[in-house]
Image (spheres, helix red, strand yellow):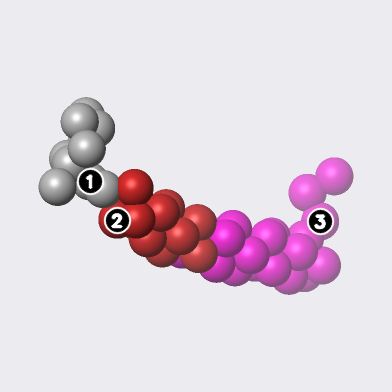
Amino acid sequence: MSDGSPTGLSNEEAKEVHSAFMSGFLGFTGIAVIAHILIWMWRPWF
């Protein structure tokens, strides 16, 4: 059950959601960094 947590998730469910969130966040950040590097190589902004 919820073990009294405010989200209603068990500890294992919360770890699973956190893992999925972090994977998505790191993937998005990696793509954004690569895109910025490629655009900067094409047309530097400073």
Q: Is residue 18 visible?
A: yes
Q: Residue at x 78, y 49 (%)?
A: 45
Q: Amino acid at mark 1?
A: Leu
Q: Position of residue 35 (x, y in %)?
A: 65, 66
Give the Cα separation between the discs numbered 3 and 1: 46 Å
Q: Position of residue 10 (x, y in %)?
A: 26, 48
Q: Residue at x 55, y 67 (%)?
A: 27
Q: Is residue 11 left or right of residue 1?
A: right
Q: Residue at x 20, y 31 (%)?
A: 4
Q: Is residue 21 visible?
A: no
Q: Residue at x 76, y 64 (%)?
A: 37
Q: Residues within 10 Å of mark 1 (few under 14, many from 20)?
A: some
Mark sitting earlier along the chain (2/3): 2
Q: Nearer the viewer, residue 24 or 9?
A: 9
- The magenta stretch is 24-46
Residue that label 1 marks: 9
Find residue 31 and report its image quarter: bottom right
Give the foreground label among 3 and 1: 1
Name above or below for residue 15 compared with residue 31: above
- Find out whether the residues at labels 1 and 2 contact each other: C-beta distance under 8 Å: yes
Residue that label 2 marks: 13
Tag 2 secondary structure? helix
Name above or below for residue 29 compared with residue 10: below
Mark sitting earlier along the chain (3/1): 1
Tag 1 secondary structure? loop
Q: Amino acid at mark 2?
A: Glu
Give the foreground label among 2 and 3: 2
Q: Amino acid at mark 3?
A: Pro
Residue that label 3 marks: 44
